[in-house]
Image (cartoon, grey):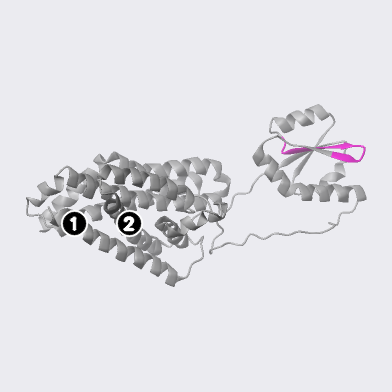
Amino acid sequence: MKNRTIHLLKVFWMETFRNKISLFFTVFFPLLFIIIFGTLFGEGGSFDNEKDLAKIGVLKIEEDFKEYLKNYEIIFYKDVEKLKNDVENGELKYGIENKENSYYIYLTNDLTNYQNFQNIKSEIDNSLKRYNYQNLKDFFIIEDEVVAVGKKKVTDLGFIITGALAISILSGGMFSVITIFGRYKKENIIKKFMTTPVKPIEFVFSSSFVQIILNFFAVFLNILFSIIIFNTGLEFNWLLLIISVFCASIAMMGFGILLLLIFKKVETAQNASSILYMVMTFFAGVYFPLELIPSSIRWLSYIMPIKYLADTIRFSASIQDMSFAYFWIINITFFVIGILLLQFASNKYVTEE
């Protein structure tokens, strides 16, 4: 039995690298997302990074104005066209011109910049009023404090990377099971296995074990890559992460079996899994906070298993608050449901052969 199991493990390990679609979505697709979003949100990836001060150009305003707007680098201009050109070319964030005590603010006509401007408009207005009255004290002071949800401050990049780890586990479990129990059965590969002394439990155990190992490989590769390239500053509790990856891997394989039971045909199950993969990627709070999802469809997030997987991974990275009881409830639920569905698959797809 020991030799049979070792041989099966070798067979399924080689098959893993032949199944290029599953391998791509498990290992390389999350890496691709990390590269794309890491480039966009790289400044937020390190907890120690200091952002450069935004530059604001001013015209016909005395030099002491910079004392009233200290959160920005103030550059003084003498020519309005030069001021407008620098704003248009991105050299300046905004431009301010004094026209007979009426102030004109220049900014580029793109949606993102306009939304950012609305957020700081009151600050600029307040600074201009204080400048006119030569009063260094604010009319009112608004102070903000970033409160970390977990033990560590969550950044855009940290949120995205932990989401990418969850997506990697989902795709590894879901796609592999559809291949093994769906395509193998259709092409009579399982039947050929069953003509040998291989027992159904050995078949299921070996295929599942190899996929769990691949998921661990993908997770740690993504973490290593993000640390080396983007200096994320994420600090994982490795024991909690290992528990999450192990239990979730079993659950996501069970999720793939559930799709096979619902859609019967392998091709239909594969198409459904691809659609669900994309839906869960963007509507389950994986890469973006749930608050950004329209409230009318936000309830969908709470019935998607990937949401809870992402939560446990973020908890292991100390960027999401969660009680240990809730953490264990999620993982035990994942483990039990996954084992039951794998046992069912063993009886339905293997023993029947």
Q: Is residue 46 visible?
A: no
Indicate the quadrant containing the N terminus: top left, top right, bottom left or bottom right: bottom left
Q: Position of residue 127 (x, y in %)?
A: 83, 49
- The amino acid marked with disc number 2 is Ser
Cα gap from disc 1 to disc 2, whole angstroms: 21 Å
Give the residue displayed 38% in from the left and 48% down from the top.
Answer: 221
As rendered, which of 333 and 209 lies closer to the eye?
333
In the drawing, does residue 318 fall left or right of residue 12?
right
Give me the residue at 47% from left, 55% from top.
Answer: 300
Residue bearing the label numbered 2: 249
Query: How crowded is the residue under tag 1: few (<14 C-alpha within 10 Å), some, or many (20+)?
Result: few
67 in magenta: no
Check the image and report above or below for 272 versus 323.
above
Residue situated in front as seen by the camera: 82 or 311: 311
Residue pointed to by mark 1? 348
Could you say where residue 230 lies in the image, as x and y percent from the top left? 50, 45
In magenta, the rendered stretch is 92-103
Residue 287, position as x, y percentages in the image: 49, 50
